[in-house]
Image (cartoon, rainbow, N blue to C red):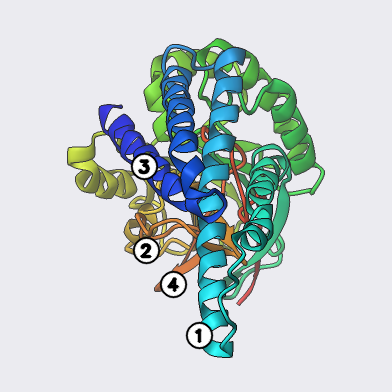
Amino acid sequence: MLFFFSILFVVLTAIIMITQKALGVIISPEQLSKVQRKLLYVDIILIVGMILGFTKLHGTTAGGIILQVATMLFMAQIIYDWLALAYVLVRYLKKKLFDVPEDPQRRKFLKGAAVLPAAAVAVSAYGGLIERKQNVVRRFDVPVENIPDDIKGLSIIQLSDIHLGPFMGLEELDKLLREASGIGGDMLVITGDLFDDNRINYKAAKVVDSYVDCFKYGIFYCWGNHEHMRGIPAINIALEGTKIKKLENSFEMVAGEVLPVYIAGVDYPIKRDQFDFLKEKYTELALKEIPSNSVKILLAHHPDFIDSAAKYNANLVLTGHTHGGQLGFFGIPLVPPIFKYLRGLYRVGNTMGYVHSGNGSWFPFRFGCPPEIAVFTLTEK
């Protein structure tokens, strides 16, 4: 947690400094100092609010509102910085390439630049209030060599990173599950970070359980890092008595006679210093005993399991954790490549891996990376 807040503080400080520099595009030098000072005070209040929202006020309505407002204001600053940079570059290139003389009237220049804050606020509002609530359905074929008729067309629906809490309540969860069940898949899988607020875990488990019978083979689920953060014992109590099939370094045969279909799941390696060792061990426990002549599907929260599962010739590895970066442009993530596999479809040898963009978030903003319902269908290779 200390590491997270350290990174958060550095990032927010950088945003403040860059925005204060970028203000010079629309404000005269005489006004700049005064506006910078006011912006700094506001941002300090927002930083304190975000820390409270992530700690003392986590899961509360007040904490959710504070985080939503703070996130949108900081994102508006970031978007403004990008727009201001683009504006300055366009003017510079226009002058250099087309020999357009510099306009001596700064008022005209400011008039053209004044639209930037409005555009930044509009984009921030869209990302914070609209896109993050609009699920898209994405469909993929999973080719299987010599697939028999009894499993041809078997479909798996994936949800991930729902993050129950201030930005995804029980009503939103019910709506999401209703939408997913309406697609008509044979099974639903949830690849971690479903539970993120212990006060509603029990009710949330009942909501998920009420949809188990909507899927021929039921609902399968594996742990994510946020389940570990909130406490596995408490979540296990919430899951008791439900028909949700939790896969914790284990597997289960779900279909097929000539070519059986197995679904496996792994725990999240929460110990950072042992991540690589635990990743390999968990994968071995989940996949090693599955017969080679079968279709193997692995559920894992962290996308690094794509590599470890490929060693066991898994047909499909469904992961999440990254949220797809939550920021994108024409499907291309705009965040630093801190994960080897960040968003979408990957192939490692004969293994097809998928990194889900997530359905919820603890950082309430999405742009160019909407939440998704992913559907995978077994087909002839």
Decide which of 134, 229 is in the foreground and name it: 134
Residue 11 is tagged as 3
Q: Is residue 230 above or below residue 153?
A: above
- In the image, is 146 to the left or to the right of 316? right
What kind of residue is marked 4? Asn
Task: Tell me the SS state at disc 1.
Answer: helix
Front label number (2 vs 1): 1
Residue at 51 percent across and 48 percent down: it is 78
What amino acid is at disc 1?
Lys
Q: Position of residue 331 (x, y in %)?
A: 59, 64
Of circles 3 and 1, the one toward us is 1
User: At numbered mark 3, what does the secondary structure look like: helix, strand or loop?
Assistant: helix
Circle 2/circle 1 CB separation < 8 Å:
no
Q: Which residue is tagged 2?
A: 310
Secondary-structure class at tag 2? helix
Counting every numbered tag in the picture gives 4
Disc 3 and disc 1: Cα gap in Å? 34 Å
Label ID, residue 96: 1
Q: Amino acid at mark 3?
A: Val
Quadrant hosting residue 129: top right
- Give whichever of discs 3 and 1 has the lower sequence position: 3
- Residue located 49% across and 13% down the image: 57
CB atoms at circles 3 and 1 under 8 Å apart?
no
CB atoms of marks 4 and 1 within 8 Å: no
Residue 303 in view (yes/no):
yes
Q: Quadrant of the N terminus?
A: top left
Q: Is residue 324 visible?
A: no
- Between the residue at mark 4 and the residue at mark 1, the CA separation in whole angstroms equals 52 Å
Left or right: 71, with 203 as reference point: left
